[in-house]
Amino acid sequence: MAGSITKLTSIQRRLSGTMKFDKTWTEFKNGFGDPQNAYWIGNDVIHHITNRQPYSMCVIFKLNNGSIFHQKYANFSVGDESTNYQLHLAGPTSGNLGDSMINTTYTLNGMSFSTVDRYNDQGSVNCAALGDGGWWFNRCHVAFLNGPWPPERWFYPWYPTIRSVSNIAEVRMMIKPT
C-alpha cells in the first residue's frame, strides 16, 4: 500500500551510562529495563517475534558529537531457549557503520547467546563475564552492543568503526518485518 509505514520494534537500547547489562540468563530471557531509557526486550520475545515471519535488523549508534551510524541486515531471527537463542543473521547488509556481524572472520551468525552465568561462546573464556554483558559472542570479537558504561572493559562496540565507547551517546537494535 502506497504511503504505508512499517512499525519498527526496538529490541535493545543503551543510553550513556544509564544501566549495566551484566545480567543473568534469566534476566536476558525475560527482558529488563525501561523502554524510555535503557533496556533489553527479552530473548523469548525476540524469538517469538522473529520466528513468525521474516525480519530485518538495524543497529544504530548515536555519538556525542551528533554523528549517526547505522547498519542494516536483511535477515534476522533468534532461535528459542533450547538453541541458547542462536542468532540467525544474513545479508545483504547496508549502511555507513560497516558490517561487523556476518562478513568477518568472527561471524556472529550461528552463535549462541552468552551471559555472565551461562557460557556459550566459541572461545576459551566467557566473554559475557569478561565484558560485563550478555551477547552472541564469537571469541569476544568484533561487535558487542551490551558492554559496560563507563567503558573500562567494553571492548570493541563495533570494530573497526566504533573502537571506543567514550564517545557513544546511544545504541539501538531495531527490527521490522520484511
Image (cartoon, rainbow, N blue to C red):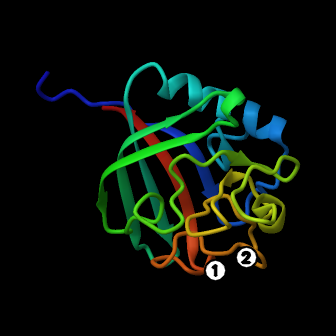
Rendered residue at 66%/45% (across/down): 112
Report the residue that reaches farthest toward the right: 117
Residue 15 is left or right of residue 123, and the answer is: left
Graded by Cα atoms within 10 Å as few (under 14), some (14 to 19) or many (20 or more), the crowding at tag 1 reads some
Rendered residue at 48%/28% (across/down): 50
Give the percent coordinates (x, y) of residue 51.
Answer: 49, 24
- Is there a contact, CB below 8 Å, between mark 2 and mark 1? yes
Q: Is residue 152 above or below residue 169?
A: below
Occupied quadrant, residue 132? bottom right
Give the percent coordinates (x, y) of residue 170.
Answer: 56, 62
Q: Which residue is mark 2?
A: 151
Q: Which residue is mark 1?
A: 166
Report the residue that reaches farthest toward the left: 2
Rendered residue at 11%/26% (across/down): 2
Give the percent coordinates (x, y) of residue 39.
Answer: 68, 45
Where is the N terminus found, in terms of image quarters? top left
Residue 68 is left or right of residue 155, and the answer is: left
Give the percent coordinates (x, y) of residue 155.
Answer: 67, 75
Count of marks placed on residues: 2
Where is the C terminus found, in terms of image quarters? top left
Rendered residue at 63%/40% (across/down): 35
Q: Callout 1: helix, strand or loop?
A: loop
Q: Callout 2: helix, strand or loop?
A: loop
Choose between 163 and 105: the one closer to the eye. Answer: 105
Residue 176 is left or right of residue 44, and the answer is: left
Graded by Cα atoms within 10 Å as few (under 14), some (14 to 19) or many (20 or more), the crowding at tag 2 reads some
Residue flagged by tag 1: what amino acid is it?
Ser
Distance (Cα) linking label 2 and label 1: 7 Å
Q: Which mark is residue 126?
A: none
Among the two numbered marks 2 and 1 on one chain, the one whose residue lies closer to the N terminus: 2
Occupied quadrant, residue 30? top right
